[in-house]
Image (tube, rainbow, N blue to C red):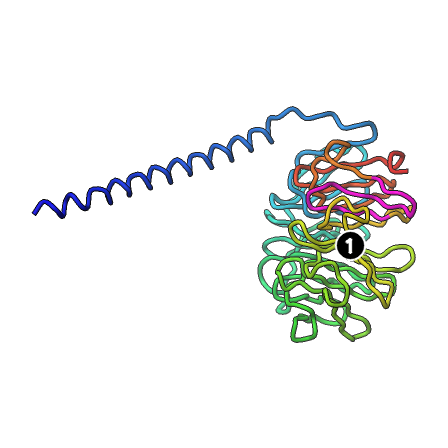
Amino acid sequence: MNASPTAQAPDRRSGRRAAVVLLQLLIGVALVAGAGFAVRTWRPRKKPPAGWSIARPPHDVLALASVGDEVWAGGPDGLVVIDASTCQWKREVLAGGPVELVAGLAAYEGHVWVAHRDGLSHFDGAAWERITSPQLPNGQVWAVLRARDGTVWAGTERGAAQLGVRGDRLWTKKDGLASDAVTVLFQDSHDRLWLGNGLTAEGGLTVLEDGSVHTYSVADGLAHSMINAIAEDREGRIWVGAGFGSRGGASRFDGSTWITWQKRDGLAGEKVRSLLVDDDGAIWFGAEYDGAARWNGNRWWYVGSSSGLAGNEVKAMLQDQHGNVWFGTEDGVSRCAREVVR
């Protein structure tokens, strides 16, 4: 009759040991996370080299826009304005109300469009409005573009919303897009609209031209299915930054053929997160983990956290009206003076 209690005792002890191990694991994770936050927050900051400046806040930055003498920076924590001449934080922007996860910005003649978690907001230089349309899905907007004809495009997880001049319309996979999710929007010098998906594994690249739709994939020569950035060089060639994790590259399209550059060809890292063609015609490739690389046609120049960047994850880049190059990273915004670049 005593056999049953004796047999169950090891099970109770095993359960207690498992609970203790789990508790210890959770405490360990919390301590590591806390230590990492403390190191990131209170560690001594190195003074950036001559010609470089760093602005914090913001911290994690996903999008940048040049607005007059200001640079607007958006990210998970919202939207802030930085003085372009001093690279100092000026103010937070509420965009008609608090905004979070600002993933895209577009600026044109004093107007600013903000893509964020709750949709799309527009600033006309005096007041804010929240843009609504039956063709604009509710929720997160990942990218925004003001096209030359005045149309505003918004990239969402459920398609690309075309808003304005020719009426509102939602483009989806049913209309020929490579995927429903659209997180990258770019208009080239021929007024073609390029749409990329860097959100889901399906990925894909689409180009809209005069009502026709064409898609490209890895089978056509893209470095990776997930598209993170699109740009055009002085020769009219389209560059596509692609990748996920430690895989990817930069693919160039001359109108008929794709070629791909990877780290072995000079890139700072395999996954290309952002692209910029500066006013000298040089191409900047922002990497997910490894800083940025600039190619001027003759040589490479590399920048990282040890040489002026606020962080090594280069998620956004722009060149302001004075020729300074700005970098949005996971740990702040950096500005590299034009004289250093040249």
Which residue is more in the foreground, 134 or 9?
9
Compared across the picture, whether 171 is left or right of 325 comes to: left
> Helix, strand, or loop for circle 1?
strand
Q: Is residue 239 magenta?
A: no
Please name the residue shown 87% across and 34% down the image. Answer: 340
Task: State the image coordinates of residue 292 (x, y, percent, origin top left).
Answer: 77, 42
Q: Is residue 295 magenta?
A: yes
Please name the residue shown 64% across and 41% down the image. Answer: 60
Task: State the image coordinates of residue 106 (x, y, percent, origin top left).
Answer: 75, 53
Q: Is residue 262 above or below residue 33?
A: below
The residue singled out by tag 1 in the image is: 250
Residue farthest along the left direction in this orientation: 1
The span shown in magenta is 283-301
Task: State the image coordinates of residue 256 (x, y, percent, origin top left).
Answer: 86, 68
What amino acid is at disc 1? Ala
Please name the residue shown 65% across and 75% down the image. Answer: 174
Compared across the picture, whether 133 is left or right of 275 comes to: left
Compared across the picture, whether 4 is left or right of 215 comes to: left
The quarter of the displayed image where residue 298 is located? top right
